[in-house]
């Protein structure tokens, strides 16, 4: 039986990846951290999952897990992943999102260098790059402490691959969403808000910049690509994206239309939600993933929006 170690198991991607790895017959060891209240709502249906405590800030805890399980594959999904928080907590973001990966790689290098490692890199690293669409060779222009931390980790992936010969790869993933997305991210915030308006609980939804454009896909499709990257003969980085971008306004319009409503009657823009150094437009070119991994996104944007709105209505009606 193959063993996979997954950091960030309690997050959106951790839950989809764990499901898929268990279906493939892996022993899955999920890394969670000690909190005062449990947050296992995304993984509580996964009885076969092994859960162990560790923290990206704590080298010893990572070292012990790698030594104990000697995993075939390691997926580093843990991070402080919300861009606005990276402005209020830049040092914590650098520690977790940037240095956390290096602590994990040091544990791998010293204890079990045969492990294959996946790093969750981000399209935010492109920031306001002059290149569009962005592929693996596009110029980076990180525009937040989060993006800078991810870019540091991304470069360390390439350094550990070249200097130490580790099988470590970066997936440069564009925005991917689902009913399991955190409530602070715009897709889930909108889906939740639309459902609350529909059920008569509120009348208005406050949002920031409606003109920003993102390339949004479905998280369950993107976690399949992570696994494929670790099955290749050669360690290489891959962009994963749909290739189509939409504005936040498109998202809001579609989400309200799903329930037969006009978004203009319910959305207010709040200047406090506008970002410093906004990333205006991200659109990915996933040609390499299509050609080498045979990867294709299965869920298109309108279906993703419908899936998320319907899930919120169902959740709120319980
Ligand atoms: P998420 O839902 O925010 O999950 C983040 C996970 O990291 C949670 O399990 C969290 O644990 C854990 N974590 C945070 N700090 C930690 C620490 N110090 N030690 C151990 N665990 C820690 O993120 P996601 O959407 O699943 O994304 C997964 C990864 O992909 C992240 O690295 C993210 O930056 C990256 N990424 C995401 C996207 C996207 O669109 N979703 C795109 C590109 C890259 P708690 O539950 O205890 O907080
Ligand atoms: O949903 P968001 O917060 O995602 P963002 O900043 O693009 O980051 C996500 O995707 C990255 C990949 O590109 C990941 F690396 C990262 O971890 C995270 O998963 O915001 C999307 C857009 C932004 O332009 C933001 O300004 O939506 C705009 N927006 C407008 N109103 C809003 C809001 N975003 C949020 N969160 N809340 C709003 O009220």
Image (cartoon, rainbow, N blue to C red):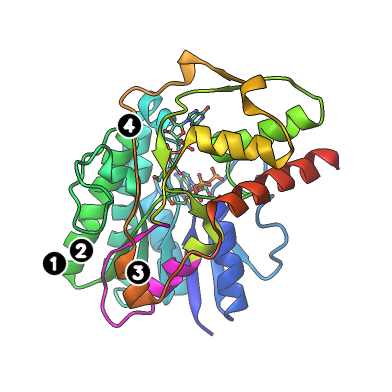
Q: Quadrant of residue 85 in the image?
A: top left
Question: Mark 4 or mark 3, which is nearer to you?
Answer: 3
Relative to 257, say whether 121 is above or below: below
* Mark 3 C-beta to ligand 1 under 8 Å: no
Question: Mark 3 or mark 1, which is nearer to you?
Answer: 3
Q: How far apart are marks 4 and 3 (CA)?
A: 33 Å
CB of mark 1 within 8 Å of CB of mark 2?
yes
Number of residues whose C-alpha sits closer than 10 Å to that of mark 4, classed few (under 14), some (14–19) or many (20 or more): some
For residue 289, the mark is 3
Q: Is mark 2 on a helix, strand or loop?
A: helix
Q: On the picture, is 68 further left or further right than 22?
A: left
Q: In which quarter of the image is the N terminus?
A: bottom right
Task: State the residue position of label 4.
Answer: 91
Task: State the residue position of label 2.
Answer: 160
- Segment colored magenta: 224-242
Give the image location of residue 199, x and y in percent: 81, 31
Give the image location of residue 302, x and y in percent: 58, 50
Q: Which residue is drawn at 58% across and 41% down?
A: 182
């Amino acid at each position: 039986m193959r063993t996979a170690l997954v950091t960030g198991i309690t997050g959106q991607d951790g839950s989809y990846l764990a499901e898929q790895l268990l279906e493939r017959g892996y022993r899955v060891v999920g890394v969670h951290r000690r909190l005062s209240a449990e947050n296992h709502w995304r993984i509580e249906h996964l009885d076969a999952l092994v859960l162990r405590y560790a923290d990206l800030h704590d080298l010893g805890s990572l070292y012990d897990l790698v030594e104990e399980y000697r995993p075939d594959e390691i997926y580093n999904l843990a991070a402080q992943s919300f861009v606005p928080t990276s402005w209020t907590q830049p040092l914590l973001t650098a520690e977790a999102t940037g240095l956390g990966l290096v602590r994990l790689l040091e544990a791998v290098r010293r204890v079990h260098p045969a492990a294959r490692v996946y790093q969750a890199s981000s399209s935010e690293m492109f920031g306001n790059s002059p290149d569009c669409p962005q592929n693996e060779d596009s110029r980076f222009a990180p525009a937040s402490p989060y993006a800078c931390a991810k870019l540091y980790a991304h470069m360390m992936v390439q350094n550990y691959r070249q200097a130490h010969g580790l099988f470590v790869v970066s997936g440069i993933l564009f925005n991917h969403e689902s009913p399991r997305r955190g409530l602070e991210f715009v897709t889930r915030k909108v889906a939740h808000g639309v459902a609350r308006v529909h059920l008569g609980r509120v009348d208005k939804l406050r949002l920031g910049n409606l003109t920003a454009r993102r390339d949004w896909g479905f998280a369950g499709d993107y976690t399949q690509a992570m696994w494929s990257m670790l099955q290749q003969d050669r360690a290489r980085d891959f962009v994963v994206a749909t290739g189509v971008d939409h504005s936040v306004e498109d998202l809001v319009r579609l989400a309200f239309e799903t329930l037969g409503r006009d978004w203009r009657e319910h959305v207010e823009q709040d200047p406090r939600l506008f970002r410093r150094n906004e990333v205006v437009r991200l659109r990915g070119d996933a040609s390499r993933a299509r050609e080498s991994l045979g990867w294709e996104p299965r869920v298109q944007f309108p279906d993703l929006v419908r899936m998320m709105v319907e899930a919120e209505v169902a959740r709120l009606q319980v």
